[in-house]
Image (cartoon, helix red, strand yellow):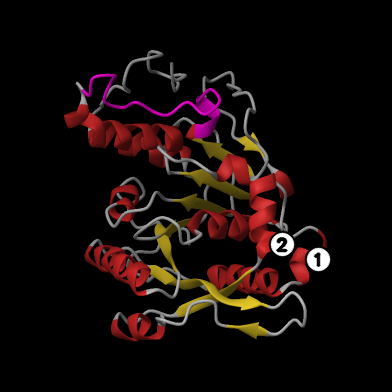
Amino acid sequence: MTPALPGETAGNPPALEDLTAALARVEQRMASVERVIAVMSGKGGVGKSAVAVNLALALARRGLQIGLLDADLNGPSVAKMLGLRGQPLRLSAENALHPIAGPNGLRVQSMDFFLQGNQPLAWDGEQGEAAALRSAMEHAALADLLACTEWGSLDALVVDLAPGSDRLPAFAQWLPGRVAALAVTIPSEVALLAVERSLRRAYAARVPLIGLVENFASVVCTACGAEGPLFREATVERLAHELAIDVVARIPFDVKLAQAADAGRVFFEGEGAKSAAGRALAALAERVLAFELPEAEADSW
């Protein structure tokens, strides 16, 4: 049985409330959050979660107060990457959820903390009887994670979105005018096609884009230190040019980064910060901090 969020009954789907009331709850809880950075991609397998986690850690290493929300409700991986799986949930006196304390002072929230072991979410019931309501229930649960978590004052909230071109517009609805997005891809034609669709949806929804992150942009030889291409069949330059979006980071493949994520260790500890991937992630954090929302849409950015 899935543990219940505050205000819902264990084992039952979250109650669907009036959209205006839900927006008001989210806005009230997020009033002290200065920036919201949504990390998105059109498909899985491009390292989006690793980018989101390490971006949050890179920002926190600068002494900033950073939150990290795993918005992939069906396939949460942030808790695993940070070594936080199995942490107990704690409620405040006001029946709000305390975020889980992570490395470098991160404040982390994820559906993983509500699940027992490797239990999957079953939105539509054992027989699929509520399949037609699945999208609405996911939307309501994500709003609850935002509104029921006592984030406190944050310089930035990094959000790891689920794969899919519809995820950013759906999330941005909860914080109109306050979300900026990073799009993560790898240099393959299949990935670029999916990411392009996500970018076009973002433009249609008028969500400001910080830029495009090319993950697995190269590979560093462990023997000689030389850096060369990992994929040869595609380049992000064409997509960046056609959609007038900046390539804000090129992150090389580093097996140690993948090993750190699997082990729940911080990649930036030790030699990670000095590696090519570590330097690229630190530079990405600088680009994110330098980004400003357009004046007409700016709130507290």
As rendered, which of 58 and 194 lies closer to the eye? 194
Magenta highlight on residue 124: yes
**Identity of the amino acid at label 1?**
Glu
Residue 117 visible, this orientation? yes
**Whole-number angstrom distance, CA of label 2 to CA of label 1:** 17 Å
232 displayed left or right of 269: left
- Secondary structure character of the magenta stretch overall: loop
**Quick one: which residue is furthest to the right in this view?**
270
Query: Which label was assigned to residue 271?
Result: 1
Asked if disc 2 and disc 1 are in contact, CB closer than 8 Å, the reply is no
**Identity of the amino acid at label 2?**
Arg
Residue 152 visible, this orientation? no
Secondary structure at numbered mark 1:
helix
Residue 15, horizontal then vertical, whole percent: 29, 22
> What residue lies at 46% left-to-right and 30% top-to-bottom?
148
As rendered, which of 89 and 129 lies closer to the eye? 129
**Dot 2 or dot 1, earlier in sequence:** 2
In magenta, the rendered stretch is 112-128
Marks counted in the figure total 2
Magenta highlight on residue 199: no
> What residue lies at 54% left-to-right and 56% top-to-bottom?
52
> What residue lies at 29% left-to-right and 48% top-to-bottom?
170
Which quadrant holds the N terminus? Answer: top left
**Quick one: which residue is furthest to the left in this view?**
132
Crowding at label 1, few (<14), some or many (≥20) Cα neighbours within 10 Å?
A: few
Quadrant of the rendered image containing residue 150: top right
As rendered, which of 273 and 295 lies closer to the eye? 273
Query: Which label was assigned to residue 16?
Result: none
- Disc 2 marks which residue? 62
Secondary structure at numbered mark 2:
loop
